[in-house]
Structures are given as C-alpha cells and as structure tokens.
Image: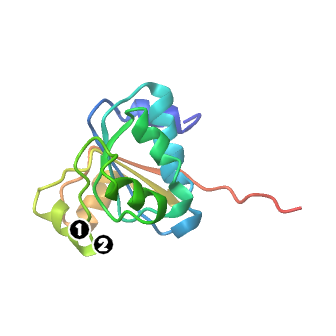
Amino acid sequence: MADLETALRECGLRDGMVISNHHHLRDGDKVALMALEAAARIGVKDLIWFPSASFPSQKSAIELMEKGVIHHIEGSMNGPLGDYCTQGKMRGMGVLRSHGGRYQAIQDGEVHVDIAVIAARPPIFSATRMARMANQPAARSVLRWPIRPTPTA
C-alpha cells in the first residue's frame, strides 16, 4: 500500500471503531500517532484508542481528542495524557487498564479491536494466521506498518 492512510481506508476504518496498538517502542513510539493522525486526515471521528500503554511522546493525541478524532482511551494513560484524562477533559469515559487487564478485556469480549496497527519487520502474517496462532478470533484488520530507521547525521 502507498501509505498508512490508504491502508486504514482499505481496512474500512470508520467512526466509532476501536483502534489498537502495542507499546513495544515505549516512549519512542510514533506508529500509534501516525495511525491516529491518518485517521484524522480521513475524517474519522469518535475512535476508541486502545493502546497497551501511552507515553509522554504521544501527547499530541490530546489535540486529536479535542478535535473529536479520539473519543476516549482505554489503556494505560501516562504523562500529559494521564493528566488530561484525570482533569476530566476527555469527552468519553477513560478506562485505565493494566497490560493484563487489556488482554482480559479482549479475551472476555468486553472490547473488540477493529483495527490493530503494530510496528513490525517482515515476515508479515495475516490477521487470520495470527489469530490461529493465538487461538483467538481475528480482529477485523491488523496492520503492521514497517518502521524505517531515521538516518543519523
């Protein structure tokens, strides 16, 4: 696919969906914001962001909440995002979930992830194969967006 925006369109991203990402890049994660910003360009609103964790580097998600792209967050909310949510500024009800609590919510069917965007390197497995490996129903779409190292000077 040409870009992440095209990939999200192809996955059928629309208002109110649950979009998820994993925090394996920690405070250097740009993939989650790239996906949420692409959703904003598409014009999608009221997403539920379901990260395994959020970090201070993702504070620009606050602007996306204020614009209505993100309705609320269900997951770990740290730094500026945690402050924003604690102050009651988020439109929806934030749900603080531990890493294990997030897994439990998916397993119990409390939350269904519509699209998961995960930074990965090849090989890339299909959502169906990943679900078979985990013995769980597949999310509607799983995107693994390649990370290209930033050249150093």
The amino acid marked with disc number 2 is: His
The vertical placement of 145 against 1, above or below, is below
x, y percentage for residue 1? Answer: 54, 36
Residue at left 47%, top 32%? Answer: 40
Q: Residue lying farthest front?
A: 87
Q: Quadrant of the C terminus?
A: bottom right
Q: Which residue is mark 1?
A: 103
Horizontal side of 117 relative to 107 (left or right) equals: right
Q: Which residue is mark 2?
A: 99
Q: Are marks 1 and 2 in contact (CB under 8 Å)?
A: yes
Residue at left 47%, top 65%? Answer: 79
The answer to whether one can see residue 25 in this image is no
Horizontal side of 111 relative to 75 (left or right) equals: left
Packing grade of label 1 (10 A; few <14, some 14-19, many >=20) is some
Closer to us: mark 1 or mark 2? 2
The span from disc 1 to disc 2 (Cα, nearest Å) is 7 Å
The amino acid marked with disc number 1 is: Tyr
